[in-house]
Image (cartoon, rainbow, N blue to C red):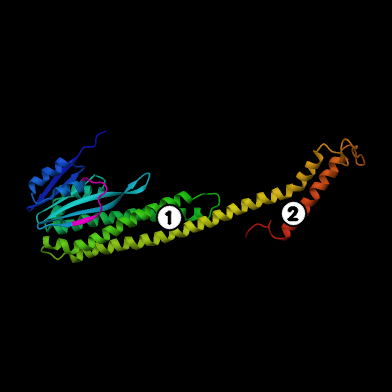
C-alpha cells in the first residue's frame, strides 16, 4: 500500500505553521519558492536518513535537525528525524510521519481555536518550544516503558528456570539508543535557548529552561536504568556461570561414580581368562548369579566410598 504524503498549513495572526510528512524533493523545492532564502542543501538534509543533528544559522531563519525515538517491534527504538525551518513569521516541520506528538499537536491546533491562539499567537520561538516540549514529554513516556521492562525482569534474573540474557541485551540496546538521542536533544535545546530569542519579543529562557530540566531528568533516569541493567547483566552472568558449574559438577560426580563399574565391565568384557569368567568357570557359591553379584559388589563398593568422601567434602550438599 502506498503511503500518502501530507502537507498542511495553519495560519494564525499572520504566523504560519507548515507540517510536511514524507515529502519528496520536489515538494521541498516548491516550498523554497515561497522562501527563497532556504538553502537547497537543507532540502537534501531533510530527506537524508543519515543526517546528524545540527543547527544551521542564517540571517532570517534557522534550520534545525533533531532526532527523537519511535517504538519499533524488532529493535525496540529507532531514530526518527525532525527537520525544522524557523523564521520570524513561520515554522516548517518536516518528518516521515513517525512522530505522533507533532501530528497530534498540529491536529489540535487546526481544530481548537483557543489552543491555536495560545501556541501560535506569540512567536515561532514559542511554538518551537511547545513542539520540542511535547516530543520530550513523549520521550518520558517511552522511558517509563523501559523502566517497566526493567522491573519486569527483576524477578526473572534470579529464577534459574528462566533465561533473561536476550531480554537484558535488548534493554541495553534500547537504553543506549535513548541515551544517544537524549544527548543530542540536550545539546540542541541548550543552543536553541539563545538562537530562537531573535524571533521572539518575549523572553523564552524560562520556557526552554523547563525543557532542559525535563531532558536532564530523562538523562538521569537513563543513567540509573543503565546502571541497573548492568547490574542485572552481571548478576545473570554470575548465576548462569554458577548454574553451569552445578551441572558440570553433577555430571562429573556421576561420571566419577561410574568409573569402577566401567573398569570392571571392561575386564569381564575381554576375551581373557578372568576369575569367575566363562572359560575359568563361574562361581557358584551364591547360586548361578554369584559372579554377577561379586562384580556388582566390586563395582559399587568404590563408588560408595567415593560418594561418602564427596559428601564429607561438602560437594553434595544443596546450597542454602
- Image quarter where the N terminus lies is top left
| Labels 1 & 2 near each other (Cβ < 8 A) | no
Question: Residue 54 lies in magenta, yes or no?
Answer: yes
Q: Is residue 111 visible?
A: no
Query: Along the horizontal axis of the image, is 261 left or right of 182?
Result: right
For the magenta stretch, what is the residue range?
A: 47-55
Label at residue 307: 2
Q: Nearer the viewer, mark 1 or mark 2?
A: 2
Residue named by callout 1: 150
Nearer to me, 314 or 42: 42
Q: Residue at image x 44%, y 57%?
A: 229
**Secondary structure of residue under mark 1:** helix
Give the mark count.
2
User: In the rendered image, which quarter is residue 118 located in?
Assistant: bottom left
Main SS, magenta region, reads loop
For the C terminus, which image quadrant?
bottom right
Report x, y in % for residue 205.
18, 66
Crowd around label 2: few <14 · some 14–19 · many ≥20 (10 Å): some
Residue closest to the eye, 36 or 103: 36
**Image location (x, y in percent) of residue 235:** 51, 58
List x then y, in percent, for residue 35. 8, 49
Residue drawn at point x = 73 percent, y = 47 percent = 258
**Residue 79: in magenta span:** no
Amino acid at each position: 500500500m502506498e503511503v500518502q504524503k501530507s502537507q498542511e498549513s495553519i495560519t494564525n495572526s499572520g504566523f504560519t505553521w507548515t507540517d510536511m510528512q514524507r515529502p519528496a524533493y520536489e515538494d521541498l523545492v516548491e516550498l523554497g519558492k515561497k522562501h527563497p532564502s532556504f538553502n537547497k542543501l537543507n532540502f537534501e538534509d531533510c530527506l537524508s536518513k543519515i543526517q546528524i543533528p545540527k543547527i544551521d544559522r542564517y540571517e532570517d531563519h534557522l534550520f534545525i535537525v533533531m532526532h527523537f525515538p519511535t517504538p519499533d517491534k524488532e529493535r525496540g527504538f529507532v531514530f526518527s528525524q525532525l527537520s525544522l525551518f524557523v523564521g520570524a513569521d513561520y515554522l516548517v516541520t518536516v518528518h516521515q510521519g513517525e512522530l505522533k506528538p507533532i501530528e497530534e499537536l498540529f491536529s489540535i491546533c487546526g481544530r481548537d481555536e483557543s489552543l491555536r491562539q495560545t501556541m501560535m499567537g506569540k512567536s515561532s520561538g514559542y511554538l518551537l518550544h511547545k513542539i520540542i516540549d511535547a516530543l520530550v514529554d513523549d520521550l518520558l513516556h517511552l522511558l517509563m516503558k523501559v523502566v517497566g521492562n526493567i522491573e519486569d525482569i527483576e524477578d526473572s534474573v534470579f529464577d534459574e528456570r528462566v533465561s533473561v540474557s536476550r531480554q537484558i541485551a535488548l534493554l541495553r540496546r534500547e537504553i543506549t539508543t535513548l541515551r544517544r538521542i537524549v544527548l543530542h536533544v540536550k545539546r540542541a535545546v541548550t543552543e536553541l535557548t539563545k538562537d530562537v530569542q531573535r524571533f521572539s519579543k518575549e523572553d523564552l529562557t524560562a520556557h526552554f529552561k523547563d525543557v532542559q530540566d525535563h531532558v536532564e531528568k530523562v538523562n538521569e533516569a537513563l543513567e540509573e536504568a543503565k546502571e541497573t541493567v548492568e547490574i542485572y547483566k552481571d548478576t545473570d552472568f554470575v548465576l548462569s556461570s554458577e548454574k553451569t558449574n552445578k551441572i558440570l559438577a553433577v555430571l562429573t560426580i556421576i561420571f566419577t561414580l561410574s568409573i569402577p563399574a566401567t573398569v570392571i565391565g571392561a575386564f569381564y568384557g575381554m576375551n581373557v581368562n578372568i576369575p569367575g569368567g566363562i572359560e575359568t568357570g563361574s562361581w557358584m557359591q551364591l547360586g548361578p548369579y554369584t559372579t554377577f553379584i561379586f562384580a556388582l559388589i566390586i563395582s559399587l563398593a568404590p563408588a560408595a566410598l567415593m560418594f561418602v568422601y564427596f559428601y564429607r567434602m561438602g560437594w553434595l550438599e544443596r546450597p542454602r
